[in-house]
Amino acid sequence: MLVLHPQSSTPLVVQIVEGLRRLIDEGALRSGTKVPSIRQFAHAHDVSVFTVVEAYDRLVAQGLLVSRPHSGFFVRRRARGPGGTAALPPAGAAGTSFDAMWYLRKVFENRHLSMKPGCGWLPGEWLFGEGVKRALRGVAGDELDFGGYGDPKGFAPLRRRISDALAEQELGVAPEQVLLTQGSSQALDLAARRLVRPGDVVLVDDPGYANLLFGLRFLGATLVGAPRTPQGWDLAALEAAIVQHRPRVFFTQPRLQSPTGSVAQLAQLHRVLQLAEKHDLLIVENDICADLDPDPRPSLASLDQLARVLHVGSFSKTISPNLRVGYVVAHPDLVEDLAQLKMIAGLTSPELTERLANGALTEGRWRKHLKGLRERLARAHELVARRLDDLGFEIFHEPKAGLFLWARHPDMPDAGRTALEAAEHDILLGPGHLFAADLQPTPWMRFNVAYSSDERVFAFLESRRRAV
Amino acid sequence: MLVLHPQSSTPLVVQIVEGLRRLIDEGALRSGTKVPSIRQFAHAHDVSVFTVVEAYDRLVAQGLLVSRPHSGFFVRRRARGPGGTAALPPAGAAGTSFDAMWYLRKVFENRHLSMKPGCGWLPGEWLFGEGVKRALRGVAGDELDFGGYGDPKGFAPLRRRISDALAEQELGVAPEQVLLTQGSSQALDLAARRLVRPGDVVLVDDPGYANLLFGLRFLGATLVGAPRTPQGWDLAALEAAIVQHRPRVFFTQPRLQSPTGSVAQLAQLHRVLQLAEKHDLLIVENDICADLDPDPRPSLASLDQLARVLHVGSFSKTISPNLRVGYVVAHPDLVEDLAQLKMIAGLTSPELTERLANGALTEGRWRKHLKGLRERLARAHELVARRLDDLGFEIFHEPKAGLFLWARHPDMPDAGRTALEAAEHDILLGPGHLFAADLQPTPWMRFNVAYSSDERVFAFLESRRRAV
């Protein structure tokens, strides 16, 4: 967009400020237009993101750009939108801007970086592609009905299988109470749309699952954090938050939590349910790592039997995230509401992917695959924890299972800044503020043990250690 | 639930009223509980729905049940929810009850009825299952990556193909502006979530696409109808509605519209865009029947080139609804917002189904299939229109293409009532009030020509004619 001259005696920051001012004055950048994100601009012009941050800050100060809260940068709007193109209304159910933290998410989600210790998924070869491929060959010979939309709740044999599997985990649900969804993220979104209204206070794990937190903010919720501890939650703080803020819903992941890897202990589950009963809370339990847990362990739903708990699961961490098959089980009344909401949000889910998940689960090698996956994750946990420890990282909890380690380093006080630097080295980090209820800077980072063994990742972290 | 005695001298209505009152008094039906829908109750007890309607009405009058507006029936709530089970908050972004018209939708969506002139999809054998099956065999040999979530916007080769196809329809969009979705319904839902906030006035086709209207109501929108005519819209009424209610967004289906089958003419498209410009409206154009249109014809988007128009398409009417592959194309800024919202709503869409749609489209028989499908629909239109005409139906418009005929009969003043009666004869009708912005009773009904050739359907309609 601009031609910059790195060798010029005019600082790059000033060149950018003057260049953008000229484009705005000339009308090439019209009022209301979103300007490139800081990262896009930095990438397109081959300059540091810090240079761009500084330049954008000055343009905001000069009244040429506006920075929407937690959003991008826009040319300050004058009377109305440019002729011909509509001025977009602000997004979000409560008028909140929903492209919150867009540029940081771009960094976070930049899947084109070659090293991804911050990502949230497993490598393809760790998953059950072989099972899906065998199921695919089976399905190709099936009599498939290509007319109609299938069952709104999803492919019935898979719902029965989930019902059976949950029964083994001491959670009794009829197949009619199982609603298949486009991964656990749709399940969480449906639950949120059903239970949360703009302005509602919602209790969330702090730190918690970033995509859910963004979704809840988009719905206009005010997030109140329940601080995680290595054993579950800080129960005193949790109760204080309930008493003070009176939330109606608590979204939580008790087991092998993202991002902390922490696992809530039995007595904690019991206590949280007591609090829910006392304060009339509903709980949405995200339990997508249940199959990665080497120990059979109760869930909130297995204690409560769905009186106050909605229970979410997925096959993304065990079969393949790309199939997009997850589920929610809930009280019969509630599941009917969620099913109707699923219709609104996209009618049914594709029967084919649900058949493939079902096929993979019924395949003889499934249990063996799960066992191998757990062992592989346990080994990766040991390795990555040791390396981080050697570098001087403090590790929140060592679950030796699931995907994540949560760690911080005294020399890296702002993980967001470290993540921006890492991106310049082709490394995707998981900076902690993205998982924070208040989005404030923090030294904590999430490490996916399956993607954290590359020596260049450790070399980068080592260099940051020395950098201070 | 209740034991009824049809031979008793006590009328069934009274037996139901007394029986339910007893269950409520004894606490077996607790306050706040949703009672079975009218249809469920009628079915479970083998009585007429009219009997149940009468009984529920009396229970409401006696203060034992409440009928939530456009919703189901509930035991009147006392102080708070029953111990142990949470009292559910009211649903809907604006506190509106979202299970609006649940019992009528149950009738409408009752896919287990053996005759479905009211349904919205094509029979499997009319669609392109063969193409999908061949694509499936191809994909089984592909190198699939089962790790990761794929591209948030969807499988890139399909996005390129859609971009090319739209270019043929004189709509220039880069593949980056194409966002793949879980059918057109997710595309509409994403657009609505991005553009509509609780309390907003939204302009919709009246009658219009039922699932969309329910979705908009759930978001808390106030719907204002733009009356459809056989040639498009009543432009005077449309402009008056805009001036009076100041909507920011218009959701419309110009071509082969559901439910009316009407097709907006070129001058109408132009005029609507002029009004949009003058009154600063955005337009969400649902064009899912484009490929069923035998005539190449402009779309709103092809005139406007996405300045104010979001354009939605789908393969559900041509390949298979069960694949759940649709798309939205929009202005570059807007499509980024929609992509982020898609992440919130379920991360990515499954690459496999997108590969299959792409495979079917690239398959040599695709154009031949489309041609055959259009011819088959044209023949069905002729047949069904003639038969309805013979029965004395007035037909709104005869498009001779697409799926639908919209018709009414002087002897059937309330299509909702006729649809309830039809359900007792194993026939799913499409009663017009479900498509109405105000949900008010109407004699109009939607006939899907692909499902309306069964003689028993005509026999039922004939009987209703004589019934008055």
Image (cartoon, coloured by chain):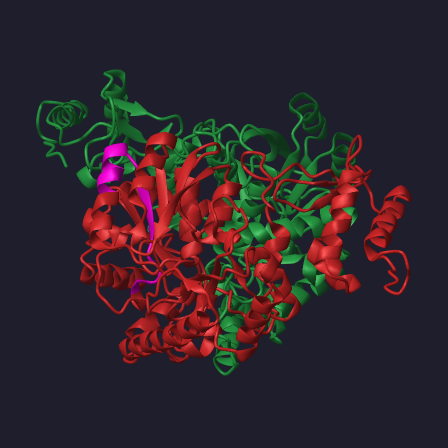
Chain colours: A red, B green
* Image coordinates for residue A427, horizontal then vertical, percent: 59, 69
Q: Is residue B454 visible?
A: no
Q: Residue furthest bottom?
A: B141
The residue at the point 24 percent across, 49 percent down is A268
The residue at the point 27 percent across, 16 percent down is B61
Q: Nearer the viewer, residue A270 or B384?
A: A270
Q: Is residue A82 visible?
A: yes
- Boundaries of the magenta span: A273-290
Please state, as top left, top right, bottom left or bottom right, where the N terminus of chain A lies in the image. bottom right
* Image coordinates for residue A68, horizontal then vertical, percent: 66, 40
For this view, does B61 lie left or right of residue B437? left
The residue at the point 86 percent across, 60 percent down is A4
The residue at the point 30 percent across, 40 percent down is A236
Please state, as top left, top right, bottom left or bottom right, where the C terminus of chain A lies in the image. bottom right
**Quarter holding residue A326:** bottom left
For this view, does B467 lie left or right of residue B171? left
**Quarter holding residue B262:** top right
Is A278 one of the magenta-colored residues? yes
